[in-house]
Image (tube, rainbow, N blue to C red):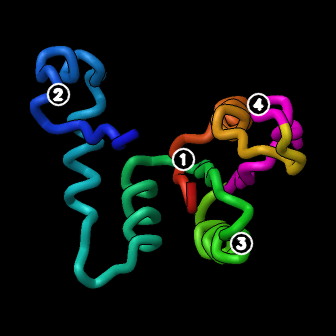
Amino acid sequence: MDPSIAAASDCNEPDAAALYDDRDPYLMALAAAFKARDADCIEEIARFASAAGWKHIGIACCVAVGKEAERLVQRLGKHFRITCVDCKVCRIPAAAFAPGESDPSCKFIGQASVLAAQATDMNNAMGL
């Protein structure tokens, strides 16, 4: 089966615009203002989150990038409270979703649920 790739024409502008709340345009402009040639992506995240007044950052990561996630936690943790959750959260066997599989499956919904329960201000995904 060929993958389906969404095109800009697949998006209905009025419907998409309705998904934004009153604060979103401000945050989008703020994010654009903090894209900087003199900073790496982690520094941009830190600058943006700080300017937005956020104190708690969530990181949803794949176990395959655990070392990189730990470095991100260390860097951002200097300035923010961090909650990091890997994709094997809840340790539900993959067989529960895909018969014949034995390893714990990735649980993206579980990651989102944990981060929501922790009331993070901003979430970042790594390696998903």
Tell me the distance, in whole angstroms, between the alpha carbons under discs 4 and 1.
26 Å
Element class at badge 4:
loop
Q: Residue beneath label 4, please?
A: 97
Query: Residue at left 57%, top 50%?
Result: 55
* Sequence-first tag of 4 and 2: 2
**Quarter location, residue 21:** top left
Report which quarter residue 74 is drawn in.
bottom right
Report the Cα–Cα distance between label 4 and label 3.
Answer: 29 Å
Q: Earlier in the sequence, mark 4 or mark 3?
A: 3
* Residue drawn at x 72%, y 50% as measured from the top left: 87
Q: Which residue is mark 1?
A: 123
Asked if 52 appears above or below 19 in the picture, the reply is: below
Residue range corresponding to the magenta coloring: 82-99
42 lies left or right of 5: right
Q: Earlier in the sequence, mark 1 or mark 2?
A: 2
Q: Does 83 appear in magenta?
A: yes
Marking on residue 10: 2
Nearer-N-terminus badge (3/1) = 3
* Residue identifier under label 3: 70
Separation (CA) of disc 4 from disc 2: 30 Å
For badge 4, the amino acid type reads: Phe
Q: Residues within 10 Å of mark 2 (few under 14, many from 20)?
A: few
Q: Is residue 54 left or right of residue 6?
A: right
Q: Give the position of the N terminus as an image quadrant.
A: top left
